[in-house]
């Protein structure tokens, strides 16, 4: 399974050194940055012959918390122009919980601002396509501008649950 050959690969996790195809590194961010108590870990693994980035942990709501996020800057300087493309494609597997993809643009300078879309996981690898037109603004008053993407985040958020998600490919399609 591979997302259509057209498009821009963000990461297929082939390197194993944490460096994405766009030249930046993935990082795990938790609600502990704002006093929450969710905890998790980020690992690189091989699962059914695929290299993958995995996030596992416990999402808790105490102290106004409630998230874990795998975050990646999409450009080392400025923004990524994804205007010619339709959306973001993922190859994922997980524990049948819903997760979010959050995008940040030059219009979302505050940490709590983003554009969000949910997706489902299952125990088998699956392709998920998230069109830019399906991203909902969160605490921002302008629609998403894919010409000005700065960061993406794969997020477990909003309720008490155990996160277990692995990503084998991220691509702009």
Image (cartoon, helix red, strand yellow):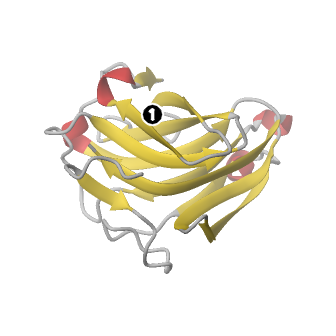
Residue 51: give x, y in percent of width and height: 53, 69
> Is any part of residue 109 visible from this angle?
no
Residue 166: give x, y in percent of width and height: 61, 54
For the point 38% across and 22% down, the residue is 134
Left or right, residue 161 beside residue 112: right
Residue beneath disc 1: 114
Residue 63: give x, y in percent of width and height: 83, 38
The one nearer the camera, 32 or 84, is 84
What is the quadrant of residue 148 in the picture? top left
For the point 67% across and 35% down, the residue is 157
The one nearer the camera, 107 or 163, is 163
The one nearer the camera, 59 or 79, is 59
For the point 51% across and 54% down, the residue is 71
Q: Residue furthest right?
A: 62
The one nearer the camera, 77 or 7, is 7
Q: Quadrant of the C terminus?
A: top left
All told, the count of numbered labels is: 1
Q: Secondary structure at mark 1?
A: strand
Dot 1, crowdedness within 10 Å: few (<14), some or many (≥20)? many
Vertical arrangement, residue 56 with respect to residue 34, above or below: below
> Is any part of residue 77 visible from this angle?
yes
Left or right, residue 58 beside residue 112: right
What is the quadrant of residue 84 in the picture? top left
Vertical arrangement, residue 138 with respect to residue 78, above or below: above
For the point 30% across and 58% down, the residue is 9
């Amino acid at each position: 399974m591979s997302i259509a050959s057209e498009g821009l690969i963000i990461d297929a996790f082939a390197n194993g050194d944490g460096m994405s195809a766009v030249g930046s590194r993935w990082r795990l961010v938790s609600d502990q940055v704002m006093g929450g108590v969710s905890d998790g870990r980020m690992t690189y693994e091989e699962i059914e012959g695929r290299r993958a980035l995995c996030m596992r942990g416990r999402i808790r709501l105490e102290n106004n918390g409630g998230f874990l996020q795998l975050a990646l800057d999409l450009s080392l300087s400025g923004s990524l122009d994804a205007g010619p493309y339709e959306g973001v494609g993922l190859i994922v597997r997980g524990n049948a919980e819903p997760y979010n993809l959050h995008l940040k643009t030059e219009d979302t300078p505050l940490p709590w601002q983003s554009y969000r879309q949910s997706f489902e996981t299952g125990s088998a690898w699956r392709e998920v396509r998230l069109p830019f037109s399906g991203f909902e603004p969160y605490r921002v008053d302008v629609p998403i501008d894919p010409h000005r993407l700065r960061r993406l985040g794969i997020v477990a958020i909003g309720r008490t649950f155990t996160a277990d998600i692995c990503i084998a490919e991220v691509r702009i399609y």
